[in-house]
Each structure stands twice: as C-alpha cells, then as structure tokens.
Image: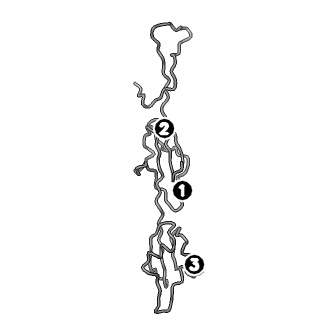
Amino acid sequence: GISKQKFTVTSLGLPPLPASEERLASGSLMLWAKWKIKTFTVTFMSDEEVHERVTVDWHQTTEGKLKLPDPVKEGYDFKGWTYKSGSAYSHTTQIDQNLTIYAKFEIKRYDVVFVIDNLDYKVQRVDHGTTLSDVVARIAGRPNDESLHRRLLGWYTDEYLTTQMKDREKVEGALRLY
C-alpha cells in the first residue's frame, strides 16, 4: 500500500464515472482521496538572517538546490552548514521535516611578524580584527635598545618606515611590522 506519512490529502471526492454509468443510491458511499506528496522547508541561516530557503519533497535532499553562493562574513572563513547542535549537515540528508540549518564560520588568523634590525624579533598569531595595541601587549615588553640610545617610537608597515600603524588599527591580514 501507499505510505501515508509522505502524502497529505488535498481533497475528497466521488470517483469519476464513465459517461455511460449512473450513480446508484445505496447505503454506502465511496470517496476517493486526492493525495499530494508532502513538502518541507529547509531554512539556511547566516548570523541570525535567512540566507536561503529551499523547499523539497518528502525524503528528497537539498543537494544542488541552493541557488545562492556560500555566505560571506568579513574576517571569517565559511566552513559549512550545521544543525543547531553544531553537528555537520549534509546536502545528501533525506528531508522528512522542516529544518533550520546554520552557517558555520571560523575566524581568520594571521601571523604578525615584528622585525628589528632586519631580523624577525617576534611572531604573533592573531585573530582577524585584533588591534595593534592588543598584539603588542602579547610581546614581553616593548623592545628598546638603551645601549645604542634607541627608543621604539612605533611600528611601521613598510621597511622604509614611512607608514606607521596606529595602535587602534586592526589586523586584517598577515603583517610584517618594522
């Protein structure tokens, strides 16, 4: 027989009769059900906003059905889709209920290399958006060379010391600071 869990009744009616037959009045009545396969909505969320909604038939998948590109978040890499629990969602999962799926992002990390006298002094691995002052605070003391009567005046993004990076500027990629 037909499994009713995958269908919904859309209407009830009398069976169609050939033009040559008539309905006879009797004590029982036969109705025919018109069935439609159930459909479900899979909602893909990205940072509390709907990225895309996909409607699929019962036990079908979302594979190849997303029309939009993967979501983008500044400073993060998109790592795939997950259930609310955090477990990975696969586009080959057969759908049998409405679902909400969430974008998983991982913050980008960069190396900040501090260069003194053409030598790498320290390397710090930091998250996207970390301020220079927060990166410098991780270094054990700001380098000074009192014996040569030099004092650190700041960090520069070029080896010619023409573009100084401000303490509140954010790291948005790998850096070499001089």
Give, as a three-letter code, the residue at label 2. Answer: Phe
Left/right placement of residue 166 relative to residue 59 reads right
Write the residue at 60% across / 80% down.
162
Assess whether mark 2 and mark 1 are in contact (beta carbons under 8 angstroms): no
Q: Secondary structure at mark 3?
A: strand
Q: State the image coordinates of residue 141 (x, y, percent, origin top left).
A: 44, 81
Write the residue at 52% across / 52% down.
70
Q: Is residue 163 above or below residue 28?
A: below
Q: Report the quarter where the N terminus lies.
A: top left
Colour convention of the picture: one colour
Q: Secondary structure at mark 1?
A: loop
Assess whether mark 3 and mark 1 are in contact (beta carbons under 8 angstroms): no
Give, as a three-letter code, the residue at label 1. Answer: Val
Identify residue for label 2. Answer: 40
Left/right placement of residue 28 relative to residue 20 reads left
Q: Which disc number belongs to residue 96?
A: none
Identify residue for label 1. Answer: 72
Give whichever of discs 1 and 3 has the lower sequence position.
Answer: 1
